């Protein structure tokens, strides 16, 4: 409809096929900013951890549907004072931490310093602003628990943790730090507006199903998670080919492997794209990573495939270690043998000071595969 520019930014009037307005100057215009339900309201890009980022198009209708579902599922009270520590150009920061609280009539506080110094003061920020909800990622909590004193007050009513599985020992640390058990590891996708599972682990305001290896849609069992929701995107920006691939009979194909039990409880197992095929045996990296994180010296893990002439794909692991710790890979292998099947135990091991991550806090699997798939053991 129009291009808005900040103070001190001057663009030639023919730069875009739309009028250009300076935010500090313009008060009124003849441009009609009214959106119809199916008009593009927003384009968000996926994090691109396993493939190229895609532009996800949300409409006025899908945005309003997600906000309504969030308020209906969690109640307005928890959104009274939101602290946004995630990037606002990703769905978790924008939909959950900004748009929903504002729609609830609440206040939004933008985290002023996402660096180490700022993170060390997050407990004080929560107290000073009487924050009621915070939406974060597991990797950030690993820093908070080490660097920040806990809040002294009891204002927090809802702590959501997204983008990756939350390990039990990390959740225990968070519950102790915040002083409440209102800590929830929620699942969602950019294409469906964020949070797709509620506090019970069942689908949030929609339907869930599974796509099995034969292309059949099932209501329970194991397979690729399918979601139907009024908050679903209209498609990928300028990519009708990818949009067509993303749907199966009206279901959005999340790309995540999941189990759904008879009560509808959803358990995310891993990503379809990250599965390792070792001589015909499917290995889910996320399951191996969850095990490795239980090893005392390990604070982060990424398991991935490397090309192998005999088995097709081999299993490798990159480990992030606790500060000032070292590791004996021979002892780790022996430890793994008594806990997982032999075919799932990594053959190549690497260690790094810090695992590469995307802006949304997810492990950057593409970078790790590029850096390590052709290397031998560290």
Image (cartoon, rainbow, N blue to C red):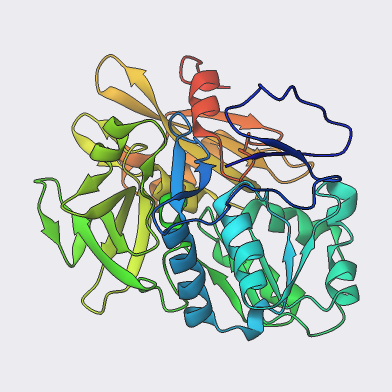
In the image, taking residue 360 as reference, residue 85 lies left or right, namely: right
The residue nearer to you, when weighing 18 against 128, is 18
Q: In the picture, which quadrant includes the C terminus?
A: top right
Q: Is residue 4 left or right of residue 340?
A: right
Camera-side residue of 245 and 40 = 40
The quarter of the picture where the N terminus appears is top right
Q: Position of residue 145 (x, y in %)?
A: 77, 62
Seen in the image, is 4 located left or right of residue 223?
Answer: right
Q: Quadrant of residue 84?
A: bottom right
Side of 198 where 123 appears, left or right: right
List x then y, in percent, for residue 304: 43, 32
Residue 199: give x, y in percent of width and height.
47, 77
Q: Is residue 172 visible?
A: no
When asked about the image quadrant of residue 242, the answer is top left
Q: Residue at x 71, y 76 (%)?
A: 106
Q: Quadrant of residue 99?
A: bottom right
Point out residue 214 in the picture as x, y percentages from the top left corner: 8, 46
* Looking at the image, residue 185 lies above or below residue 17: below
Please tell me which residue lies in front, 372 or 94: 94
Foreground residue among 135 and 239? 239
User: Does any portion of residue 255 appear in the rendered image?
Assistant: yes
Q: Residue at x 66, y 77 (%)?
A: 79
Q: Disc count in the image?
A: 0
Q: Residue at x 17, y 67 (%)?
A: 219
The residue furthest front is 30
């Amino acid at each position: 409809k129009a291009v808005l520019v900040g103070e001190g930014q001057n663009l030639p009037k023919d730069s875009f096929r739309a009028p250009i307005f300076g935010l500090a100057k313009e008060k009124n215009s003849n441009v009609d900013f009214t959106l119809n339900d199916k008009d593009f309201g927003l384009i968000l890009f996926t994090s691109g951890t396993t493939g190229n980022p895609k532009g996800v198009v949300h409409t006025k209708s899908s945005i309003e549907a997600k906000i309504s579902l969030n308020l209906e599922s969690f109640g307005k009270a928890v959104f009274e004072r939101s602290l946004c520590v995630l990037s606002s150009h990703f769905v978790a920061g924008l939909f959950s931490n900004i748009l929903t609280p504002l729609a609830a009539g609440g206040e939004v506080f933008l985290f002023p310093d996402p660096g180490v110094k700022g993170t060390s003061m997050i407990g004080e920020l929560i107290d000073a602003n009487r924050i009621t909800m915070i939406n974060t990622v597991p990797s950030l909590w690993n820093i908070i628990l080490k660097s920040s004193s806990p809040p002294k007050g009891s204002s927090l009513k809802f702590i959501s943790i997204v983008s990756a599985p939350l390990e039990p020992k990390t959740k225990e640390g968070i519950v102790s730090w915040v002083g409440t058990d209102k800590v929830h590891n929620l699942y969602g996708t950019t294409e469906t507006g964020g949070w797709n599972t509620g506090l019970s682990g069942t689908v949030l305001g929609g339907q869930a199903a599974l796509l099995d290896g034969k292309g059949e849609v099932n209501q329970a069992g194991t397979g690729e998670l399918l979601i139907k929701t009024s908050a679903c995107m209209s498609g990928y920006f300028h990519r009708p080919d990818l949009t067509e691939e993303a749907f199966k009979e009206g279901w959005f194909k999340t790309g995540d492997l999941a189990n759904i039990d008879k009560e509808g409880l959803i358990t995310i197992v891993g990503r379809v794209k990250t599965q390792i095929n070792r001589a015909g045996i499917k290995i889910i990296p996320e399951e191996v990573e969850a095990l490795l994180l239980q090893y005392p010296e390990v604070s982060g893990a990424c398991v991935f495939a490397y090309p192998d002439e005999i088995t097709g794909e081999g299993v490798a692991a990159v480990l992030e270690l606790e500060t000032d710790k070292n590791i004996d890979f021979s002892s780790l292998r022996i430890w793994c043998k008594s806990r997982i099947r032999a075919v799932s135990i990594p053959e190549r091991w690497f260690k790094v000071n810090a695992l590469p991550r995307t802006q949304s806090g997810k492990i950057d699997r593409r970078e790790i595969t590029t850096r390590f798939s052709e290397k031998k053991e560290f």
